[in-house]
Amino acid sequence: MAETNPNPQPVADGLLKAPTGIKGLDEITGGGLPQGRPTLVCGGTGCGKTLLAMEFLVRGAMQFDEPGVFMSFEEKSGELSKNFASLGFDLNELVGQNKLAIDYVHIEPSEIEETGEYDLEGLIIRLGYAIDTLGAKRVALDTIEALFSGLSNEAVLRSELRRLFRFLKDKGITAIVTGEQGERTFTRFGLEEYVADCVIFLNHTVSQQIATRRLRIVKYRGSAHGTNEYPFLIDRQGFSVMPISSIGLDHPASTERIPTGIQRLDAMLGGKGYYRGSSILVSGTAGTGKTSLAAHFVDAACRRGEHCLYFAFEESQNQIIRNTHSIGLDLGQWVAQGLLQFHNARATLFGLEMHLVAMHRAIDVFNPAVVVVDPISNLVAAATEAEVKSMLCRMIDYLKMKQITAFCTDLTSTGGRLAWTQVGISSLMDTWLLLQAMETSGERNRGLYILKSRGMAHSNQVREFILTDEGVQLRDVYIGPGGVLTGSARDAQEARDKAESLDGQQEIERKRREIERKKTAIEAQINDLHTQFEAEKDDLDRLIAKEKQRGETLALDNRAMAKGRQADELTDQQ
Amino acid sequence: MTNVENSKMTNQPTTSEAKWLLRLYVAGQTPRAITAFANLKKICEDYLDGGYQIEVIDLLVNPTLAKDDQILALPTLVRKLPEPVKKIIGDLSNTERVLVGLDIRPII
C-alpha cells in the first residue's frame, strides 16, 4: 500500500521530505519527515520509539541510499542488533557495509564527577565524526534525555542541546530524536522546545484486554499532514501505520461480471452475477447459510482458475471443507491446487489493525481475485463498532483499489442487529444479500432476497434458499392469499392447490359430459321430429298421388264412357 | 600552551615511576581547555609529588577516541591509572571535587 518514492518529493511550499519507507507513515506525512531537520518522536515506555527511529535509518540506508548514524543512550549496539534481528533487520550487515553506524553513549552518573564548566563538544565531535565517515544523511538520537539523568547542570545541557540541533540542521541531517512521554508535556524534559519542526506522538493503550498502538502527528511545520490518530503495529516486518482516510475514492470500476456460483442467484442479479471488484455483503442470522453462499462463490471462482483468499474468523479450514462437502462442494481440491488459501484466526487473537495488516500482507503475497471475510461481525469482539467500521472501510477501499471482489458475511442476531449493519458498513457495500429465517407452522426456512445491488437490474423477489446435497438451490416462494409460504407449508399449500385444481377439472369434465348428453338428447329429439315430419310429408305425398290417380282414372273412365257412348272426340282435357 | 603541545599522546606510561596516568580530553585550544590543563597541572604538582603523567588528547585531531573512550562532555579528565578508571568533567576549577573524583587524599 505504501508506495514509496525513492526521491524526496518537493511539495508546494518547497519543503523537502525524507521518505521513511515505513508502511503508511509516508502517506500521512505527505512524503516523509522534514528533510534536514530534526523530528521528535515521543511516547510512553514500550510504544515503539526506538523501533521507529531505527527503521527510519535502516530503510533510509537500504531503500533510499542514505546512510544513518544511530546514537543510542540506552541500549548497547550488541543489544540493538539482537533486538532488531528479531524484526528482520540485520544491523551488523549494514554496519559492515558502512551504511549504518551505531554509537552507544554510556552515561553513568555515579562515574562522572563534575568540576566546573563544561560543554558537550565531545558528543558533537563524536556525532560529527560518525556522520562524516559514513556520509550520513540521517541520524537518530535514542533517547537523548538520558543526558539529563547523567549530567546535573541543566542550564548547560539545554544550551548544548540547542547547539547540537543547530549543528545537525547545519549539516543538513534528517534526524529523529526520541523522548519519553512526560506527565503533562510530550517529553519529560521538554525536548519539544528544541525540536519544533515535526513532532510524532506514539501511544499504546489497552482496551478490553486488547492492546492498540496509535500514532499521531502532533505538529509538522510547513506541511499539511494527517491529524488523526492512526493505528499502527509492530510485527516481524517492522512498523506499519494504517492511514484511515488517506485513500481517495478513485478506484476503478469494472463492468465485468462474475457468476455467483448459483445459477438462480445469477438470474436474480440481472442474469450475470456480481461485478468484479465490487463488495458483497451477505447478512443473516445464525444458520441461514452465509458460509454456504460464500463457499459457492469461492468454488465458482476457483473453477474459473482464479485465486481465492478465505479469511475465516469462526471455523478452521478443515471444518469449512468438511462442512461444504455436505452441500456437494469440494473446496479441498482447490486448496490442493493452490487456488484457494485459508487464513484462520480468532478475532480476539490480536487487535484490529493487526488483523488488517495480516490481511493486507496475505493479499499482497497471494494476489487473489476474490477475498472472503467470514464473518466480519466477529471482529467486533476485538474492538468497538466504530473501529471495525473504519477498519472495514479501509479494507474494502484497499480491495477495490486492487480490483479484488470482496465477499463478506455478517452475522446478525435477531433483534435490531441489522440496523447496525445498515449504519455500519452497508454504504460501503455494492451488493447486499439478506438471508432470513422464516418461522412458520413449527419450522424454520431460509429466505433470500437482494436488499440492494448497485448498478444492475435485480430481482425484488424473495426466494426460498434450500441447502441440498447438490448445493444451494433457490426456489420461488409460494405467494398466495395465505401470504408467503415456505418449506412444508408451501408443499402443503401446493398440494392443496393441486387438489383444488383437480376438483375444478373434474367439475368441468362433468359439465362437459352433461352438455354432451344434452346435445345427444336434443339431437335425438330433432331426429324424431324429423322422422315425424317425414312421415307426415309421406302421407301427404301419398294422398296427393292418390288424388291424382283418382283424377286420371276418372278421366279415363269418362273417356271410355264417351267412347262407349260414341260421343264426340274430346280434346285432351289436360 | 607549550605544555599541551609537548605532552605525550601515547597510552603507555614512559616513566616507570609514574603511578598516576591522567588523560585530559579537549577539543582544540579553547580557553576552557587551557584553564583545565592549568588546573590539572597545579593539582598534580600540589598533591601527586611527581609520580604522574598527563596526556592531553585533542579530539579535533583524534575524533575516533571520543567514541572509543566514551567521551561526552569536554573537557574530560580520565584517570587511567591507578585503576579503576574514573571520569571527571569540567574545567577542574573546583579542586575539592577533583580530589574527590581522582580519589586523592591530601598529603599530611
Image (tube, rainbow, N blue to C red):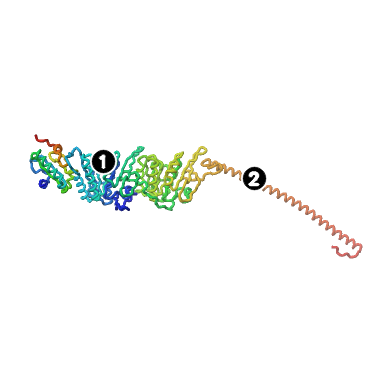
Residue A552 in the image: x percent, y percent?
84, 59
Work out whether residue A142 can be spotted: yes
Identity, as a three-letter code, of the amino acid under mark 2 = Arg
Which residue lies at the image location 53% right of the left edge and 40% below the top edge? A489
Tell me if residue B17 comes above or below residue A532 in the rendering: above
Are discs 1 and 2 located on one and the same chain? Answer: yes
Parent chain of label 1? A
Parent chain of label 2? A
**Circle 1 sits in a helix, a strand or a loop, which is it?**
loop
Looking at this view, is A302 or A140 the one in front? A140
Asked if residue A529 lies left or right of residue B27, the reply is right
Name the mark on residue A510. Answer: 2
Which residue lies at the image location 72% right of the left edge and 50% below the top edge? A526
Asked if residue A186 lies left or right of residue A293, the reply is left
Identity, as a three-letter code, of the amino acid under mark 1 = Phe
Nearer to us: label 1 or label 2: 1
Name the mark on residue A189. Answer: 1
**Circle 2 sits in a helix, a strand or a loop, which is it?**
helix
Whichever of labels 1 and 2 marks the residue nearer the N terminus, that label is 1
* Residue sitting farthest toward the top: B108
Asked if residue A471 lies left or right of residue A117, the reply is right
Looking at this view, is A124 or A49 the one in front? A124
